Image: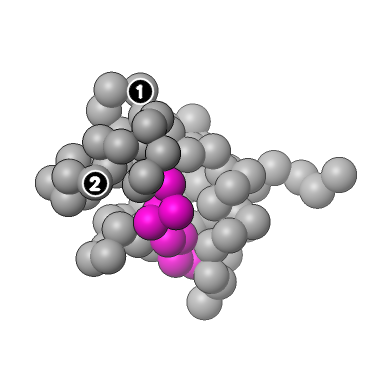
Amino acid sequence: MEALHDIVAARPLDGYKVDVEFDTGERGIFDCTGYLDKPYWKKLNDNDFFRMVRVGYGTLVWPDEIDIGPEDVWEFAKRY
């Protein structure tokens, strides 16, 4: 089983993407568009709301207890 890598920094980008940095020092771009049509993440469709993304306990978080776990971000972020 691969170790869980916490997110330590997040910056919203255009197109519902987030620039993330992991505790390993690696960086990547995580595309959230695949989440926008799912009920739990529906509020992320509002660009102003989406841009409120922050890091909480190693996870991408938004107001109203919306989050995306670091395991998904680690797996799907395009590293650079």
C-alpha span from label 1 to label 2: 15 Å
In the image, is residue 30 part of the stretch drawn in magenta? yes
Q: Is residue 20 left or right of residue 78?
A: left
Q: In this view, does 64 lie above or below 26?
A: above
- Residue 62 visible in this rendered orientation of the protein: yes
Q: Which amino acid does label 1 sit on?
A: Glu
Q: Which residue lies furthest to the left in this view?
A: 48
Task: Name the residue at 17% across, 45% down.
Answer: 46
Q: Which residue lies furthest to the top in this view?
A: 64
Q: Which amino acid does label 2 sit on?
A: Asn
The answer to whether the residues at label 1 and label 2 have Cβ atoms under 8 Å apart is no
In the rendered structure, find residue 47 and report the number of the disc placed on it. Answer: none
- Between 44 and 62, the one nearer to me in the picture: 44
Q: What element carries label 2?
A: helix
Q: In which quarter of the image is residue 25?
A: bottom right
Q: Name the residue under label 2.
A: 45
Q: How crowded is mark 2: few (under 14 residues within 10 Å), some or many (20 or more)?
A: some
Q: In the image, residue 26 lies at what x, y percent?
A: 57, 65
Sooner in the amino-acid sequence: mark 1 or mark 2 = 2
Q: In the image, residue 21 lies at what x, y percent?
A: 48, 58
In the image, is residue 49 part of the stretch drawn in magenta? no
Which quadrant is the N terminus positioned in? top right
Task: Name the residue at 25% across, 36% down.
Answer: 43
Q: Residue furthest bottom?
A: 80
In the rendered structure, find residue 65 and report the number of the disc placed on it. Answer: 1
Q: In the rendered structure, which segment of residues is drawn in magenta? A: 27-35
User: How is colour applied across the structure in the image?
Assistant: one colour
Task: Name the residue at 54% across, 51% down.
Answer: 73
Q: Is residue 61 left or right of residue 2?
A: left
Q: Is residue 64 above or below residue 5?
A: above
